[in-house]
Each structure stands twice: as C-alpha cells, then as structure tokens.
Image (cartoon, rainbow, N blue to C red):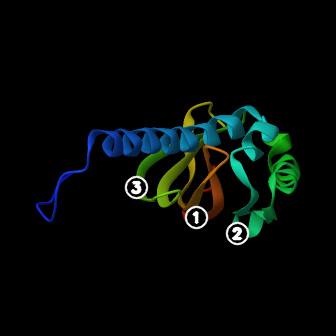
Amino acid sequence: MNTGAGPAPDLETRLRRAEDLLEIHQLFIDYGRHLDVGDFAAYAALFAADGELLLGPLGRARGPAAIEALMTRVQGGAVGATFHLITSPTVVLDGDTATAEVMWTVVARAEDGRPAVTMLGRHRDRLVRETGRWRFARREGHIDIPVRLS
C-alpha cells in the first residue's frame, strides 16, 4: 500500500509481502489444527530451532523437542476435547522477522453436549524466516477471559 510518502513498491516486493502474510496466517491455523488433533510433533515443528513457547501456568519450553514434550504432558489427555479458533491476526513484517498478535477461543463440549467457550485470549508472537519457512521464534500466550464449564 502506498501512503504517498514515496514510490509504490514494485510487483516483486508486493508479491513477496503477500506470500509472507499468507504463510504466516497458515502458521496460525496449523498451530490450532495440530493442537486439536494431538499431533504435537507437527505442532512443535512450527517453532524455530531455538523457538520459545510461554504458556503462563501451563509451562514454558525452548526448542521443538521440549515444546513437543510440554504439549504432550499438558494436552495429551485432552485430545479431541477442545477446539481452538484462531482469529483477528495482525502481522508487522520486517524482512525475515515479524511480530504478530492473534486472538484465540477455546470451545469444548459442556455437560449437556452443547458447545461452550472455555477461554479467550491472545498470542503475542515474534516470527522468523528459518530455512525459507516462517516459524515461531517466541509465542507468548495470554488468557484474557477464563470461563468454567458448569
């Protein structure tokens, strides 16, 4: 987008930006999808080699192996019990790095079988292009609204 402050970016620059944003948005979607089906190896592979995951009281881990172990421990018994909706992504690109924030909603089955929102929050991210792919360098989770099922 040209704000009038200088010449418009060339087609190659605009295409690269669009491809980067699409890949980063897919990273957010894959995060929730892998988590929900319990594919913690694929989930951990979304992180850079020294990527860091900070999930408040659930734990923290650095590197894909430690992230996979953390998620297996905290989510392994709950696979299929919840669904993560990832929304409202904002991304600021800066070459091979980026910052981002997404909203997330966790939906589970209430005792009566109907869907119930159990938590709402945000992830604040630092992203890096590593070996040609976008990865999480740091993902920090924040719970904005914890909700209990009755």
Residue 143's label in the rendered image is 1
**What's under tag 1, amino acid-wise?**
Ile
Q: Residue at x 57, y 42 (%)?
A: 27
| CB within 8 Å, label 1 to label 2 | yes
Q: How crowded is mark 1: few (under 14 residues within 10 Å), some or many (20 or more)?
A: some
Q: What element carries label 3?
A: strand
Q: How crowded is mark 3: few (under 14 residues within 10 Å), some or many (20 or more)?
A: some
**What's under tag 3, amino acid-wise?**
Thr
Q: Is 85 situated left or right of 81 in this image? A: left
Q: Is 71 situated left or right of 101 in this image? A: right
Q: Measure the alpha-carbon separation of dots 1 and 3.
A: 18 Å
Q: Is 95 situated left or right of 135 in this image? A: left
**What's under tag 2, amino acid-wise?**
Gly
Residue 110, picture quadrant: top right
Out of 82 and 136, give the one closest to the viewer.
Answer: 136
Residue 90's label in the rendered image is 3
N-terminal-most mark, 3 or 2: 2
* Above or below: residue 111 compared with residue 136: above
